[in-house]
Amino acid sequence: MAGEPQADCLFCKIVTGEVPATVVRETATTVAFRDINPQAPTHILVIPKAHYADAASLASAEPTLAADVLREAGEVAAEEKIDGSGFRVVFNTGAGAGQTVFHAHAHVLGGRGLQWPPG
């Protein structure tokens, strides 16, 4: 069921502490942690504690929780001091877009020039 923890989900296991992560922020509804394969000097994932497969299903089911994730992305950028130089927030949706963990998550990237279009 959407929103419920999934036993086979890596990010659900990070939420419960079953899998370690370098957590940089945590709220009642979100967890932010450093990406293990960073694509920029600052690369942090912000996830909802509730399980939704992707950003679209999260936003459809719980728009307030989706807003929490976006707000935390901004807070992470400020704490990492990349808010002034610019940062990118990316949601990959589906395997064809590069999503590898099917638990909604935002990538917060910064600390270097980020050209457009990406990839």
Image (tube, grey):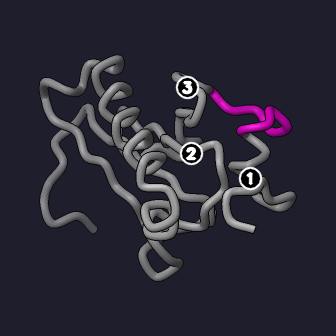
Q: Which mark is residue 102?
A: none
Q: CA distance from mark 1 to mark 3?
A: 19 Å
Q: Residue at x 43, y 47 (%)?
A: 64
Quick one: quadrant of the N terminus? Answer: bottom right
> What percent of the width, then of the height, locates residue 10?
74, 53
Task: First in sequence, mark 1 or 3: give its number.
Answer: 1
Viewer-side residue, 26 vs 115: 26
Q: Residue at x 85, y 37 (%)?
A: 18
Please tell me whether residue 83 is drawn above or below residue 52 in the rendered image.
above
Dots 2 and 3: beta carbons under 8 Å? no
Identify the residue under disc 3: 27
Q: Nearer the viewer, residue 99 or 114?
A: 99
Which of pointers 1 and 2 lies earlier in the amino acid sequence?
1
Report the predominant secondary structure element of the magenta stretch.
loop
Crowding at label 2, few (<14), some or many (≥20) Cα neighbours within 10 Å? many
Q: Quadrant of the C terminus?
A: bottom left
The disc labelled 2 sits on which kind of residue? Pro
Residue on which disc 2 sits:
48
Q: What's drawn in magenta, residue-wise?
A: 15-22
Q: Residue at x 60, y 28 (%)?
A: 28
Residue 115 lies in what quarter of the image?
bottom left
Are there few (<14), some (14-19), or many (20+) residues within 10 Å of tag 3? few
Q: CA distance from mark 1 to mark 2?
A: 13 Å
Residue carrying label 1:
10
The residue at the far bottom in this view is 96
Residue 17 belongs to magenta span:
yes
